[in-house]
Amino acid sequence: MSKTGFFVAGAALGAIAALLYAPKTGAEMRTEVCDKVNALLGEAKDWGATATAAAPATPAEAVSAVAAEAASVVESVEAQAAPVFTEASDDLREKIEAARARIAAQVAKNAEEAQAAAAEAVPTEVPVEVAPVEGEPAAE
């Protein structure tokens, strides 16, 4: 037997011993015990009636009630979480726009540097000598 079983058995034996050694007569004790049992039964019936009245009539009603409660909880969480996500997405958009601006500036700088390097490497004016064609006067 487990510790719980020994405890319950000891409690029952103690209750019986208390009833046997009580300073009341048997008739008084039986009347008092019956009154207590009847009071407990009345409380149990009241509790059962309250639970039955509060419980839905069918399982479908219970499911719909739970679903409605769950939907309201989800809506509440969404309403609380929306500002957090909006702030985070706004911050992210700002960072993305700043990165785009930095990249565009770097691309423009690189294009200018490449154009300058190309201008240095390739002269824009190349002296060209034109050979005179037979029969035409020479150009001066």
Image (cartoon, grey):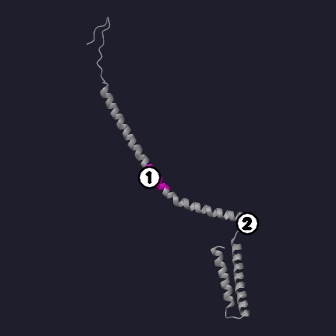
Q: Considering the numbered disc 1 on the image, is that residue within a helix, a strand or a loop?
A: helix
Q: Residue furthest front?
A: 1
Label 1 sits on residue:
91
Mark 1 packing: few (<14 Cα in 10 Å), some, or many (20+)?
A: few
In front of the other: 56 or 130: 56
Measured as percent of width and height from the top left, residue 62 is found at 69, 65
In front of the other: 15 or 39: 15
Q: Determine the CA span between mark 1 and mark 2.
A: 50 Å
Measured as percent of width and height from the top left, residue 129 is found at 29, 14
Q: Looking at the picture, which amino acid does disc 2 mark?
A: Thr
In front of the other: 1 or 54: 1
Say the numbered circle drawn on residue 58: 2
Q: Residue at x 33, y 28 (%)?
A: 118
Measured as percent of width and height from the top left, residue 126 is found at 30, 20
Q: Considering the numbered disc 2 on the image, is that residue within a helix, a strand or a loop?
A: loop
Q: Nearer the viewer, mark 1 or mark 2?
A: 2
Image position of 74 with respect to 14: above or below: above
Which region of the structure is painted magenta?
85-94
State which tag comes first along the sequence, 1 or 2.
2
